[in-house]
Amino acid sequence: MELILSILVGVLFAAALYTMLRRSIVRLAIGLTLLSHAANLLIFTVSGVSRAGTPIVPEGREVPIIGSSDPVPQALILTAIVISFGVLAFLLVLVKRVYQTVGSDDSDDLTSTER
Amino acid sequence: MTVQLTAPIMLPFLAAALAMLAWRWVAVQRWLGAAGAIAQLVAGIVLLVTTRAQGVVATQVGDWPAPFGITLVADLLSATMVVITGLLGLAVVVFSFGGLDNRRESFGYYPLLLILLTGIAGAFLTGDLFNLFVWFEVMLIASFVLLTLGGERAQLEGALKYVTVNLVSSALFLSAVGIIYGLTGTLNMADLSERLSDLDEPVLETTVAMLLLVVFGIKAAIFPLFFWLPASYHTPPVVVSAIFAGLLTKVGVYALIRTFTLLFVDDVGFTHGILLAIAGLTMVVGAVGAVTQQDLRRTFSFLVISAVGYIVMGLGLFTGVAIGAALFYLFQDAIAKTALFLVCGLVRWVGGSFRLEQLGGLYRTHPLLAGLFLIPALSLAGIPPMSGFVAKIGLVDAGLAGGQYLVVGLALLASVITLLAVAVAWAEAFWKAAPEGASINLEEYRARSRGERMSMFVPVIALVAMVVGLGLGAQPVLELALDAGAQLMEPHAYLDAVLGADR
């Protein structure tokens, strides 16, 4: 399972970078979305995939049962998903405004900052 | 300890929330902006006094003990950076009263600026790697909106580049955090420091170190990851450029200093050798880039990059004295850069343009402004008696003591080129005759009320006075920087404060 997920992470990173290197700024946004997915899946994979039980402390005990899965990576991913959702929503609006203002979705036309 | 550590984060955040509620009343937002920045400055000073008296202080948020909960921790470096954040925030807020158009002011400028200050203080005070990521994002989303506020074409284009590069950096940061957690099972930086030194995985450890070097290097704009900075920093109004130039890259530098003194110190020959090489290239490339620019703000954007090189040089030398000198450079450069960008705003206001070919002859009409420009500009080049001189002499001295003659040579070369760049800029804008057809725009100048002029000149004069003061009376701050450097080189106090002395 870890091997399959590792390959998937690599494919996602490669696809994200390839898409971002295209000149269309819409593809840039799609590439950045894929990139955040790749990072989240990487956290999930490197912290160990297991079929262990839920990390909920049973009543009457102080610590979780040995062998329950690690909740921290999931908490990290959840936080990262929420943040990337907000940032990507901003990015989509930005891409739309750039398209409206510049009149093109070609990143080669974004040259007014280079003087 | 809780209040001292949370106040610099919570007070500006509270002011931001109140300013959002006062959306329709810009005057109220202005005062809340000033109140938030003053509160952060005072809280920072209290924190600095506490750390000066008691050493490193830490608190566990929600009372979850380290390394399980999120730790807030302040050593001398963090506390001083928080003070500088509040100081520059206040200067920029006051300048904005007169120096920002009313339309931008009424679209949430003050709340956003306060959230930016919140995020920066959070990044300086957190003791947890993932929490650092979260504070970076808080800071970034506020900076994204500040950069685009106004929606001019150049702003939108600059913002797209800035946002893209920062999102790539965030994704890499997350990946690095994931790998570190997989390696060690902790994200608390003090705990990580101990576990990484016990870890027998040199290859993976160095991989993560390099990944974080790229991440923080993008934020700090080191060579060769700086291209986004001169493409975006000059596009928003100068008040926004000023706070970005003064603080945002410095947060990246801070993160580099923190990780490469606390976490990755097992293979110093390799990692810090790379840092030293990067430092030399960053200094020179930034300075050379500055010489060729026609837009004042782009000139200083390149000099922001060059300054990062000097600070990283101190980190790369990796002795207490070198890091102390680098920290002094960091403190004074934040002030000088903010001052310079605000001066650019004044030049634009009286001269009608940021572009050198359209400026000229301002010395005759505005000698005070010429002085305000020249002092921090010469400080960047390291001319005595300004603060940049003390900082550079400290770094050069530490470099010679470490036998790193090549990087010292590059530092001196970069200084000379910086002097050329600022001298050309000053001569073009102030000394040469005003170009044909350029009229010094006195109408716009006179259109501002006395109060608005005061709000623009007073913060600039105060910051420039600080640049001179830090040069002439360098001793107390230099001692503070050297103590902070010594504290970074001996992380026991940091570990004890976070994890408890009886671990």
Image (cartoon, rainbow, N blue to C red):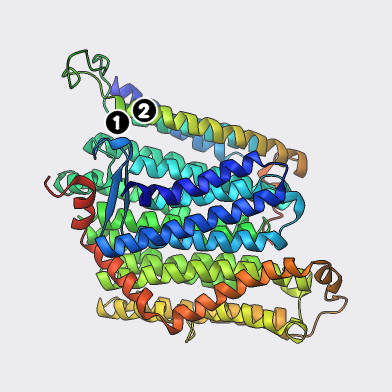
Q: Residue at x 42, y 49 (%)?
A: B7
Q: Residue at x 22, y 49 (%)?
A: B193
Proximity of marks 1 and 2: CB atoms separated by less than 8 Å: no
Amino acid marked by disc 1: Val
- Quadrant where the C terminus of chain B lies? top left
Secondary structure of the residue carrying numbered label 1: helix
Residue B424's mark?
none
CA gap between label 1 and label 2 equals: 14 Å
Q: Residue at x 42, y 67 (%)?
A: B330
**In screen coordinates, is B196 left or right of B370?**
left
Secondary structure of the residue carrying numbered label 2: helix
Amino acid marked by disc 2: Ala
Instruction: Evaluate whether residue B440 shows in this view.
Output: yes
* First reached walking from the N terminus: tag 1 or tag 2: 1
**In screen coordinates, is A111 left or right of B6?**
right
Query: Which residue is at the front of the view, B360 or B13?
Result: B13
Tag 1 and tag 2 share a subunit? yes
Q: Residue at x 49, y 82 (%)?
A: B386
Residue bearing the label numbered 2: A75
Q: Quadrant of residue B260?
A: bottom left
Q: Estimate the x, y position of residue A1 in percent, counting from the top left.
A: 29, 19
Instruction: Evaluate whether residue B295 shows in this view.
Output: no
Q: Estimate the x, y position of residue B415 in percent, counting from the top left.
A: 48, 79
Residue A46's mark?
1
Report in which chain the residue with disc 1 lies. A
Closer to us: mark 1 or mark 2? 2
**In screen coordinates, is A114 left or right of B36?**
right
| Circle 2 Cα neighbour tier, 10 Å, few/some/many (<14 / 14–19 / ≥20) | few
Report in which chain the residue with disc 2 lies. A
